[in-house]
Image (spheres, grey):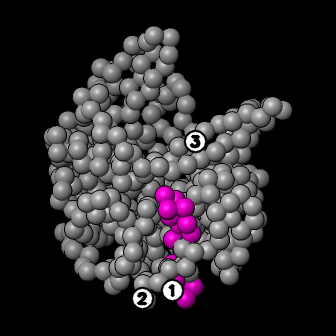
């Protein structure tokens, strides 16, 4: 073990957690009382393998990529009918693993096709058009991965910069803004990364995450503002396109101790999220390409193989979504098996609402008056639901 020992990482983590505890004192606000979101307006009657990001189309149908089912669906939530768009393959009008659908200007859609490692523009009638590779080579021999965590009204893609070795000593990652045709890349903000343990023994380097360590979550508003939910001193910060920053209040929360039940819930949640993997291949002429895939986690890990903090952070580090009213939906940590909770923040960083739902649910997208949730059952099947946006 090098100087980046697990003891050192855990010591740093303990300091961060103590800071969070201190910020629950007089300077922290309690926020509104959580209220149930209520029953869904519609539940699609057939399951999906996985649902990550959906798009409500003009007219009310929903574009639902299913990367595990390897199909792109146009879904009618009211009639319970779905139609497959496109076919499997590598050519025009085809995909290998459709993963996410994001709105583009002109009623167009950006489809993330992980299997072919490309971003595909779909026209207003869902016709397949221009494509760009997800992995963009750089002059230094590296890559920029345009794997979207959000897209603004100008068609810019926002993605996390690749983290490498050694870990950034500041513990922060960069949020990249990538131009619509991949011609420009700049930094739109930064966020706190989760803690890791680095093992440099036996002539190899192993980097292992510390599960449930504090890590920020972030997302993008249509105007290009980036919102970062702070895992230390819980609250949200807004980074405007002009570079100005609005820092929200610190919100009080009661830390949840990590027990065996919390560890089991963590791995169950990780299994249901399905992870994105990446492979690099080099051809005989020296050209390097990146391939991607999304797959579920099936192994049952040994909890003792991991380092754990004493308590959960306030929030999940999953991608933040911004609704049509400009509110940020931040998924909160709850005790294992006690349902789902979201805090809603306005553009000033004020906590304006808090909603709860039964079971394991997460936001998959929005319509003008709707929020789409994916619900997971005990078999880890994904079900798409539509709820009325809270006022």
The percent position of residue 20, horizontal first and vertical second, equals 26, 42
The mark found on residue 60 in the picture is 1
Is residue 34 shown in magenta?
no
The percent position of residue 379, horizontal first and vertical second, equals 29, 59
Residue at left 23%, top 41%?
263
**Label located before the other in sequence (1 or 2):** 1
- Could you say whether the residue bearing mark 3 is in a helix, strand or loop? strand
264 or 172, which lies in front? 264
Q: Which residues are magenta?
A: 58-72
Q: Quadrant of residue 319?
A: bottom left
Residue at left 64%, top 63%?
88
**Label located before the other in sequence (1 or 3):** 1
Between the residue at mark 3 and the residue at mark 2, the CA separation in whole angstroms equals 37 Å
Between the residue at mark 1 and the residue at mark 3, the CA separation in whole angstroms equals 34 Å
Mark 1 crowd level (few <14, some 14–19, many ≥20, 10 Å Cα): some
Residue 391 located left or right of residue 76:
left
Is residue 60 shown in magenta?
yes
Image quarter of the C terminus:
bottom left
The mark found on residue 97 in the picture is none
Query: Which residue in the structure is indicated by mark 2?
Result: 78
- Could you say whether the residue bearing mark 1 is in a helix, strand or loop? loop
Query: Which residue in the structure is indicated by mark 3?
Result: 278
The percent position of residue 272, horizontal first and vertical second, equals 36, 54
Q: Quadrant of residue 235?
A: bottom left
Marks 1/2 in contact by CB < 8 Å: the verdict is yes
Residue at left 31%, top 80%?
40
Q: Nearer the viewer, mark 1 or mark 3?
A: 3
**Label located before the other in sequence (3 or 2):** 2
Compared with residue 325, is residue 171 higher up or lower down, i.e. above or below? above
Compared with residue 379, is residue 312 higher up or lower down, i.e. above or below? above
């Amino acid at each position: 073990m090098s100087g980046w020992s697990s003891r050192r990482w855990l010591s740093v983590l303990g300091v961060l957690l103590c800071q969070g505890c201190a910020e629950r004192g007089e300077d922290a606000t309690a926020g509104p009382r959580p209220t149930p979101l209520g029953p869904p307006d519609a539940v699609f009657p057939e399951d999906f393998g996985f649902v990550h990001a959906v798009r409500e189309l003009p007219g009310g149908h929903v574009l639902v990529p299913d990367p595990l089912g390897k199909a792109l669906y146009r879904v009618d939530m009211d009639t319970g009918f779905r139609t497959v768009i496109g076919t499997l393959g590598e050519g025009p009008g085809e995909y290998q693993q459709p993963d996410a659908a994001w709105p583009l200007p002109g009623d167009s859609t950006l489809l993330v096709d992980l299997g072919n490692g490309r971003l595909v523009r779909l026209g207003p009638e869902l016709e397949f058009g221009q494509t760009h590779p997800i992995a963009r080579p750089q002059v230094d021999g590296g890559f920029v991965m345009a794997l979207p965590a959000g897209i603004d009204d100008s068609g810019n893609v926002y993605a996390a910069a690749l983290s490498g070795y050694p870990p950034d000593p500041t513990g922060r990652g960069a949020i990249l803004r990538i131009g619509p045709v991949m011609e420009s890349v700049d930094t739109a903000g930064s966020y706190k990364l989760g803690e890791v343990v680095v093992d440099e023994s036996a002539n190899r380097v192993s980097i292992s995450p510390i599960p449930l360590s504090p890590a920020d979550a972030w997302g993008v508003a249509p105007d290009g503002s980036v919102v970062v939910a702070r895992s230390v001193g819980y609250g949200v910060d807004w980074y405007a396109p002009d570079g100005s920053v609005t820092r929200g209040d610190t919100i009080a929360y009661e830390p949840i101790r990590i027990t065996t039940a919390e560890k089991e819930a963590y791995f169950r949640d990780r299994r249901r999220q399905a992870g994105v993997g990446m492979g690099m291949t080099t051809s005989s002429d020296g050209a390097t390409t990146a391939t991607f895939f999304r797959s579920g986690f099936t192994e049952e890990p040994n909890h003792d193989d991991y380092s754990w903090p004493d308590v959960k952070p306030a929030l999940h580090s999953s991608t933040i979504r911004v609704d049509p009213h400009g509110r940020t939906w931040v998924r909160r940590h709850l005790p294992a098996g006690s349902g789902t909770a979201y805090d809603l923040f306005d553009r000033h960083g004020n906590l304006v609402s808090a909603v709860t739902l039964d079971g394991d649910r997460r936001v998959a997208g929005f319509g003008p008056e709707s929020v789409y949730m994916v619900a997971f059952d005990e078999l880890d099947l994904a079900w798409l639901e539509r709820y009325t946006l809270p006022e």
